[in-house]
Image (cartoon, coloured by chain):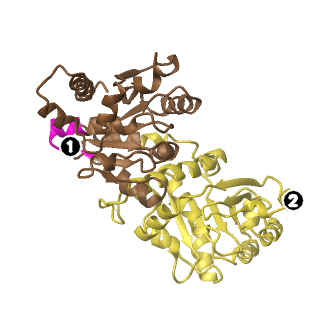
Amino acid sequence: MAKPVVIVVGADKGGVGKTTVSRTLLDYFSANNVPTRAFDTESPRGTLKRFHPELTEIVDMTTTSDQMKIFDTLNAASPSVTVIDVRAGLLSPALASLRDIGFLDAAKSGQITFAVFHILGPSIASLDEIAETANFMQGAKYFLVKNFINNTSFFEWDQATYNSYFHRIKDATELTIPKLNEMAYEQVEVASVPFLKFVANKGINDDAANYSFVLRGYVRHWLANVWSEFDRIKLTDLVGTGKPARGEK
Amino acid sequence: MRRTPVYIICSPRPLVGKTLIARLLSEFLLLKNGTVAPFDINLKEPSLLEYLPKITETAEVEDTFGKMSLMDRLIVNDGIAKVIDLGFHAFDEFFKMSEEIGFMKEAARRGVAPVILFVADTDRASARGYAMLEQHIPPTAFVTIDNEYVLRGELPAAFSHGRVLRIAALPVFLKTYIDRLTFSFTDYLRNEKDTSTELHQWIRKNYFSFRELELNLILQRL
């Protein structure tokens, strides 16, 4: 049986696009027929749940009962990938909790595949986050995500400073999320549907929708670029499914 | 099923005769089908809107709103042929956007047939524009316009890979005559009794070329 996979998407800063990245991950796994479930820690009102209500459960990661809800069900026969969208400011505490419950040790010993998508903000504070997060990363796949979706400029960073932080983490991989046309992004927000459904011109209940062809085109183009990044890091290999033929879908 | 044609008349160069061809084609389609939807994205040059104000809509591709209001109309298979007079300033942005949003593929899926009418010129920008279009547009949907008034000689070999539509040059006095804002090609054909005049024959020859273009489309050869 395939190992359970846990992907944590987080940052210690708000508004850097954690939920957007989580949404692209759920769309990617859905397109690749990988059974997935998601937890939204933005309790009580989850943004991820608004877009993927069937897959997502809202949890409070600071409570023991919800930690049990997530991690005690990992070995259940059902979905192989668990995506956790960690609320702003909770990444380091969440990783600390994972360490405390022995989850990180399980990942280190290879019982669980564990990956962290660390969404970076443009400020130097993000570099400190990297250093802080790095302490928990033994046994995990660590992805540093530069998210340009909201036109973030990363050139504020001195490259040497950035490298000094970046290279502290062995095997960390950089990932780039390109910019999406603002109006297209806004329309998907208003429609409250996954990116995939928006591209397919479908509403929340798979009913026919009437989204702009231009905006759908922008989203399709952008999503293809994001997914090519996921292909580049061999995300399907990480979750143990290999690369299926997405075109057959 | 009949496909709805979308003729995009374009060049990365100003003053190569795009609006003249858009006028001719719009009047031909109006005469033949009784309806046509011309769009003017050429407001910085002599404009289609000035010649056919009753039927022409303006459009722009500089912002997302403009792109949406234009492209969401073009992608509809409503049986009404569209003619786009694409200004030189909008050339790069229009085709970049078309590529990004997958216009050609979606058009094929929805029964819309875009036909790119590229007006050739002898400069470097035209050669670059032609090469770019050749990469992205299927050869069946790509026609080069050899406007004799602009090229004044043989069409350069670089432009003659695919289908070519020739527009003969008119003498200057006739050019001035047709450039009047009140001039209508179809009205001229209807009102001029002498069918042997040079202008009469010029209009008929061009209408015949457009008819062939349409026939190719109907026969799915385009």
A108 or A187, nearer to the observer: A187
When the figure is inspected, residue A115 is found, relative to residue A66, above or below; the finding is: above
Q: Position of residue A130 (x, y in %)?
A: 79, 66
When the figure is inspected, residue A51 is found, relative to residue B136, above or below; the finding is: below
Magenta stretch: dominant secondary structure: helix
Q: From the image, which quarter does the C terminus of chain A lie in?
A: top left
10 Å neighbourhood of mark 2: few (<14), some, or many (≥20)? few
Chain under disc 1: B
Which region is colored magenta?
Answer: B27-37
Please name the amino acid that badge 2 sits on: Arg
Chain under disc 2: A
Is label 1 in a helix, a strand or a loop?
Answer: loop
Residue found 48% across the figure and 22% down from its top: B159
Residue A228 visible in the snapshot:
yes
Residue found 59% across the figure and 76% down from its top: A41
Please name the amino acid that badge 1 sits on: Gly
Residue bearing the label numbered 2: A168
B96 or B207, nearer to the observer: B207
